[in-house]
Each structure stands twice: as structure tokens, then as C-alpha cells.
Image (cartoon, rainbow, N blue to C red):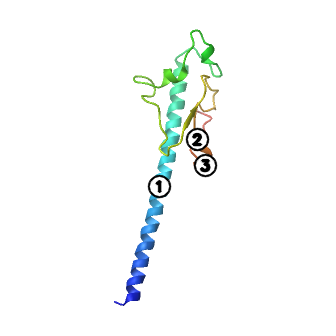
Amino acid sequence: MTLIEISVVLFVLLLLTSLLWFAARSWKAGSDRVFCIMQIRHMQVSMRSYTHSSPYQPGQNLSQAKPPVNLLNELVGPGKYVPEMPRCPSRGIYQLGDNVVPEVGELYMRCSLAATRRHEPKDYRSW
């Protein structure tokens, strides 16, 4: 083989390897996005389950309830709706709603990467 043929073969191999690397990175980013959205959904469903089994209504501030209730402590912890506080796989930060039960169609938990990496569901009105 000549030096040119060897160079062409190496170039093609490097090109295929780089394409595979970019495909793996985009697959990882997509799976992280889906995992983050599923965690937001799980927290939303947990919050709705808690409020359906309690006397609280959407829009109610639980800090003013008698006795005051910390919504996060009621949702997250061993033996509760969510065993531990979720973490974004892409190192985003979750912002929780205050101690207010969100209205139907509003999210209780949002990811800081929602705007830049689409870490937010497209439609969550039924959640």
C-alpha cells in the first residue's frame, strides 16, 4: 500500500470515530433530558397525590395552615411519596414551588436547564 492509501484509510476511520462520538454525546444529552422530565413528573404526581389525600386545595399556602405544613417535608423522605430529593443528571438545579400547592397545570418543580437544554415537558396541563 502506498502512503496515500494508508492516509485515506486513517482519515475515514477517524471520521467514523468522530461521528460515533457525537452520536453518543447527543444520545446522552437526550437521555438526561428525558430523565429530568420524568423526575419533574414524578414530583408533580407525588404532590398531587398528597394534596388529594389531604384537605388542601390548589393555590393554598400551607405556611398559613393550622398547623403549618412544610410541603417538601411531606413529599420527600424515607417512606414518603419520593424517597430522596431528585437531582438533575445534567447538573441542573431544581427550583421548587414555595409552600403553596400549585394550581392544576402549573409545575411544582422546575429545572434550571429548562430554557437552555429543554429540561421541561412540552405539555404538563394534565399533571
Q: CA distance from mark 2 to mark 3?
A: 8 Å
Q: Residues within 10 Å of mark 1 (few under 14, many from 20)?
A: few
Identity, as a three-letter code, of the amino acid under mark 3: Thr
Label 1: which secondary element? helix
Q: Position of residue 80 (x, y in %)?
A: 43, 23
Which badge, 2 or 1, comes first in the chain's sequence?
Answer: 1
Q: How many marks?
A: 3
Of badges 3 and 1, the one in the foreground is 3
Which residue is denoted by mark 3 in the rendering?
A: 116
Choose between 107 and 63: the one closer to the eye. Answer: 63
Residue occupying the far bottom of the picture: 2
Is residue 100 shown above or below 92? above
2 and 3 marks in contact (CB < 8 Å): no
Choose between 90 and 120: the one closer to the eye. Answer: 90
Q: Residues within 10 Å of mark 3 (few under 14, many from 20)?
A: few
Labelled disc at residue 112: 2
Of badges 2 and 1, the one in the foreground is 2
Labelled disc at residue 71: none
Labelled disc at residue 27: 1
Label 2: which secondary element? loop
Q: Position of residue 89 (x, y in %)?
A: 47, 44
Identity, as a three-letter code, of the amino acid under mark 1: Trp
Residue at point 52% right, 24% down?
A: 72
Q: Position of residue 11 (x, y in %)?
A: 43, 78
Q: CA distance from mark 2 to mark 1?
A: 21 Å
Q: Residues within 10 Å of mark 2 (few under 14, many from 20)?
A: some
Tell me where residue 105 sits by quadrant: top right
Q: Position of residue 109 (x, y in %)?
A: 57, 33
Label 3: which secondary element? helix
Identity, as a three-letter code, of the amino acid under mark 2: Ser
